[in-house]
């Protein structure tokens, strides 16, 4: 019995065809020739540098948001009830007027503000970072 055919009917497979026809063709691997390893290492380093830069920008934005107080003047009825309410859209627009650009879906507000007072509202700056802005709702006039 031949050592390469331990089981009858089996034959050795060539993995070169799998690499060339599937892995390389679909961009899942690259041939290790020339400077491919150095190119991959450089790509990893540039992505890490970009992530660090974005993290720094997000932390700076979070610090600006945390040091901001928004004063919203609204019409008030009897008992301090507001005519209408303060929503995520209005908070995002007020921050935008201050030069802090956020989308309304980043403002984490369970329900609109309907009473006078001071509120801490969370703003999701990045996946790992949440900042709080102080929103003061006072009567207009």
Image (cartoon, rainbow, N blue to C red):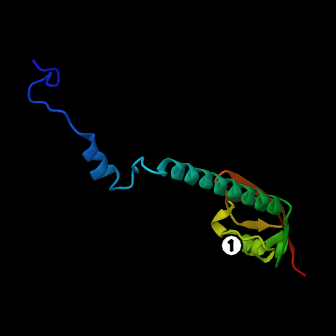
Classify the position of the C terminus by image quarter.
Answer: bottom right
Question: In percent of the image, x 79 and y 74: which residue is there?
Answer: 99
Seen in the image, is 141 located left or right of residue 19? Answer: right
Front residue of 89 and 38: 38
Question: In percent of the image, x 74 and y 56: which residue is there?
Answer: 56
Question: In percent of the image, x 27 and y 40: which residue is there?
Answer: 15
As drawn, the residue found furthest toward the front would be 34
For the question of whether residue 128 can be seen, the reply is yes
Seen in the image, is 29 located left or right of residue 120? Answer: left
Q: Residues within 10 Å of mark 1 (few under 14, many from 20)?
A: some
Residue 51 position, x and y percent, is: 65, 54
Considering only vertical position in the picture, is 134 above or below 128?
below
Residue 122 position, x and y percent, is: 74, 58
Front residue of 60 and 68: 60
Seen in the image, is 107 located left or right of residue 42? Answer: right
Question: In percent of the image, x 77 and y 62: which residue is there?
Answer: 61
Q: Which residue is mark 1?
A: 89
Seen in the image, is 12 located left or right of residue 1? Answer: right
């Amino acid at each position: 019995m031949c050592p390469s055919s331990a089981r009858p009917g089996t034959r050795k497979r060539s993995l070169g065809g799998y690499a060339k026809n599937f892995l390389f063709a679909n961009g899942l691997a690259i041939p290790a020739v020339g400077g491919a390893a150095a190119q991959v290492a450089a790509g990893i380093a540039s992505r890490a540098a970009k992530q660090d830069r974005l993290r720094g920008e997000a932390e700076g934005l979070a610090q600006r948001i945390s040091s901001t107080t928004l004063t919203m003047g609204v019409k008030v009825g009897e008992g301090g009830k507001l005519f209408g309410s303060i929503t995520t859209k209005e908070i995002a627009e007020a921050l935008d007027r201050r030069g802090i650009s956020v989308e309304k879906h980043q403002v984490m507000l369970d329900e609109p503000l309907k009473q006078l007072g001071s509120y801490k509202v969370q703003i999701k700056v990045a996946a790992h970072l949440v900042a709080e802005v102080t929103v003061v709702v006072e009567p207009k006039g």
